[in-house]
Amino acid sequence: MKTTLYITRHGETQWNIERRLQGWQDSPLTALGVCQAQWLGEALREVAFTAIYTSPSQRTRTTAELIGAHHSCDIIPHDALRELYMGDWEGKTREELQQREPEIFAAFWSRPHLYRPVNGSESFYDLRERVLPFLQSVLEEQKGETLLLVTHAATLKTIMAFFDERPMERLWEPPAAYPTGLCKVVIEEQKPLIELYGDISHYREWANVQG
């Protein structure tokens, strides 16, 4: 029995442009972010999703709704798909954090297996312990179905690291998790086959869209 899982990140947000970490906080999709979600929705319009699962953050819910406009299935929010909780880093720019806590910030991006938050936030191991039980439960309960997960960069990378058996120290290695970059994993006889990872072939020329 074949289960097909599509996974994507939300569209571009205002804080993405400002290089601010978002975590559990939120910022709205930009005009480009809305288009990215619409483009992906059009690319997936012929896929018969059984369900769309989304992080409850507004940026992911909006993305899921724009994609789901082409489908009649339920859109189901689930806390397990939230982004990594970053405590008081949320809302701060990368430049601010690089100056304030250079060693911890460097570990966050370059040595995720050694990243140890000191502000009550989650480690990448905490994130993995949050998302993988949900993922395994969904795959077991909806075996043979076609599903879409709409989530965030670190969460998406954690899910894909599970499928390609990537150790934590290699979490951030390419492919990158671009806004609405699409992953596709087909699971058959408990063996995952990654068919897409970070695919952005649905992107269009932004200048042409703006007119």
Image (spheres, helix red, strand yellow):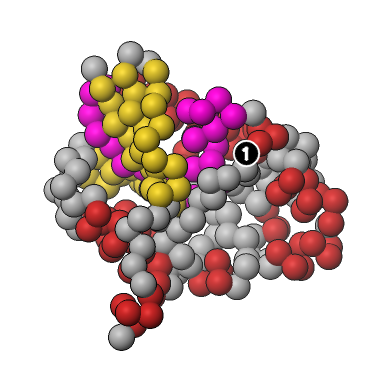
Amino acid marked by disc 1: Leu
Q: Where 201 falls versus 184 (above or below)?
A: below
Query: Which residue lies at the image location 40% right of the left edge and 55% below the top edge?
Result: 200
- Magenta-tinted stretch: 143-166
Q: Where 186 falls versus 93 (above or below)?
A: above
Judge left or right: residue 114 versus residue 184: right
Which residue occupies the foreground of this view, 7 or 15?
7
- Residue 107: x and y in percent read 77, 46
Query: Which residue lies at the image location 75% right of the left edge and 49% below the top edge?
Result: 119
Disc 1 marks which residue?
171
Determine which quarter of the picture holds residue 139. Answer: top left
Q: Where 197 falls versus 96 (above or below)?
A: above
Tell me, yes or no, if residue 180 can be seen here: yes
- Residue 85: x and y in percent read 61, 48
- Residue 35: x and y in percent read 33, 69
Query: Which residue lies at the image location 28% right of the left edge and 63% below the top edge?
Result: 38
